[in-house]
Image (cartoon, grey):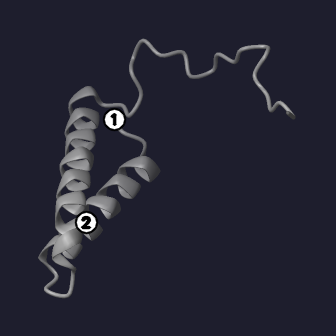
Amino acid sequence: MMDGSHEDTLREIVGRLREALHDSSTPASALPSISSKLAEFDERMRMAEESGSLFDVNDDVTEVAEDVGASIV
């Protein structure tokens, strides 16, 4: 089962993209980008619903490398 907050966020994004795609005031130049993002988020939703999780089952989401951090250059 997907986490409710992540599922809600993905559904909201998909809904807003669909609205923008069908809004007559959306510039034609924005339509390819909106369509691409809509397809991307639709795919994410489909995959998450099929797998029951937004995360890959094999991912260790708690793993942290010791050398992770910001570097000042």
In primary-sequence order, the first of circles 2 and 1 is: 1
Task: Specify the quadrant of the image occupied by residue 1.
Answer: top left
Considering the numbered disc 1 on the image, is that residue within a helix, a strand or a loop? Answer: loop
Task: Specify the quadrant of the image occupied by residue 58.
Answer: top left
Which amino acid type is shown beneath numbered disc 2?
Leu
- Residue 49 pos. (x, y %): 24, 37
**Where is the C terminus found, in terms of image quarters?**
top right
Q: In the image, which disc is placed on residue 1?
A: 1
Q: Is residue 8 above or below residue 67?
A: below
Q: Is residue 53 above or below residue 9?
A: above
Q: Residue at x 36, y 49 (%)?
A: 7
- Residue 11 pos. (x, y %): 30, 57
Please rate how many residues cluster around mark 1, counting C-alpha atoms within 10 Å: few if below 14, some from 14 to 19, many from 20: few
Q: Is residue 39 above or below residue 72?
A: below
Label 2, label 1: how far apart the Cα atoms are: 24 Å
Q: Nearer the viewer, residue 55 or 68?
A: 68
Left or right side of 44 for 53:
right
Q: Residue at x 75, y 22 (%)?
A: 68
- Residue 8 pos. (x, y %): 37, 56
Q: Residue at x 20, y 87 (%)?
A: 25
Task: Specify the quadrant of the image occupied by residue 70.
Answer: top right
Please rate how many residues cluster around mark 2, counting C-alpha atoms within 10 Å: few if below 14, some from 14 to 19, many from 20: many
Residue bearing the label numbered 2: 17
Q: Nearer the viewer, residue 63 or 8?
A: 63
Which amino acid type is shown beneath numbered disc 1?
Met
Q: Nearer the viewer, residue 56 or 34?
A: 34
Asked if the residue under mark 1 is in contact with the one under mark 2, i.e. CB atoms within 8 Å, the reply is no
Q: Residue furthest front?
A: 73
Left or right side of 8 for 5:
right
Q: Nearer the viewer, residue 69 or 14?
A: 69
- Frontmost of labels 2 and 1 is 2
